[in-house]
Image (tube, rainbow, N blue to C red):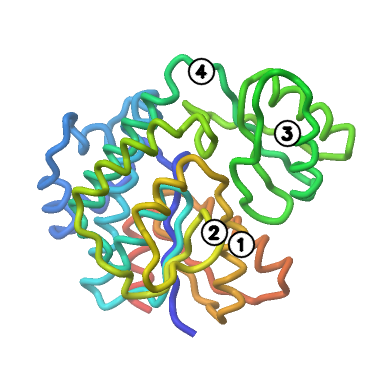
Amino acid sequence: MGTVFLYAGQGSQRVGMGKDFYDGYETYRNFIDSLTLDFDIKELMHEGPEDKLSLTEYTQPCMAAFAAGVTALLKENGVTPDAACGLSLGEYGALHAAGVFDAKTFVDLVAYRGKVMADAAKGLECSMSAILGTDSQTIEEACRAYEGDDYVTVANYNCPGQTVICGDESAVAAVEEVLKEKGAKRCVRLKVSGPFHTKYMAPAADLLGERLAEISLKAPSIPVSANVTGDFYQDGDDIRGILMRQIQSSVRLEDDLKKLLEAGYTDFIEIGPGNTMSGFLKKTARAAGAKVTIRGIDKAEDLEKIIAG
């Protein structure tokens, strides 16, 4: 079957991202130079500093700019998607690939999303932890059974054997201990700057909805997976409403990937930086007994290999 473009989420960013594309491809360079944000996006992507690049309000537009620029290069060279999927902010990349909004709108919208999410996280003492080696049902039950005054929930269902919890620090720590007792192999704290995909993002969702109301959204031209539902967008879906729900609800990436595999897709291209999505797909495909081809585009040489066939 056809090719699926996979779009990375927050956490895959790195200093130097996109510099070789900028130096070697006029289309990519012209796009980056056309962006008008309230910071120098080219300088931050190429030179850092890393601590600033890792802040949500900066990470998200940088990741979007990379994704949009590489997508343009692929299409310019005749490589187009037959379906698309993304992790959290990566879902916006998938929607862009499907023609829901253009490249500049994509970056501007994600920059706004990053700002309102960062604002919603201010003053909160929250943590996010990837639970490895335990099934998601056990993790859900542990979160529901937590009896403290604080809040914890499942933020991401990434792939078999990896589920992410998020919430107040004390609640996350308590649930981690319970899950270790129940056999979890590891609990890995993630370097994030806010309780994303939880109820704490409700103020950000409201503001994002206001911004989305100002934007003309087209229907996806190809199948796109929605993180909130773990299924494809359907004809007539309220894209604005789904994106508002997305930042305050669990990301059901494992279900998204399963849907793509069930639909018969076997060829995947991850548009990075990084290879996080590829790792999640490999584990999901292995569990499903599916054979897939996965290629990643982190550097210019990766693109060149794909273009060369």
In the displayed structure, would residue 267 be above or below residue 122? below
Residue at the image position 79 percent from the left and 36 percent from the top = 142
Of badges 1 and 2, nearer the viewer stands: 2
Going by the numbered disc 4, the residue's amino acid type is Leu
Q: Residues within 10 Å of mark 1 (few under 14, many from 20)?
A: many
Q: Secondary structure at mark 4?
A: loop
Q: Is residue 34 left or right of residue 222?
A: left
Disc number for residue 124: 4
Q: Is residue 7 left or right of residue 170?
A: left
Distance between the alpha carbons at the discs numbered 4 and 1:
30 Å
Of badges 3 and 4, nearer the viewer stands: 4
Residue that numbered label 1 is attached to: 255
Decide which of tag 1 and tag 2 comes sooner along the chain.
2
Residue 50 x/y as whole percent: 38, 27
Residue at the image position 22 percent from the left and 44 percent from the top = 108
Q: Secondary structure at mark 1?
A: helix
Disc number for residue 187: 3
Q: Is residue 251 left or right of residue 39?
A: right
Q: Residues within 10 Å of mark 2 (few under 14, many from 20)?
A: some
Disc number for residue 229: 2
- Is residue 24 something that shows in the picture? no
Residue 127 x/y as whole percent: 59, 25
- Is residue 246 something that shows in the picture? yes
Circles 1 and 2, Cβ within 8 Å, touching? The answer is: yes
Distance between the alpha carbons at the discs numbered 1 and 2:
8 Å
In the displayed structure, would residue 262 be above or below residue 123? below
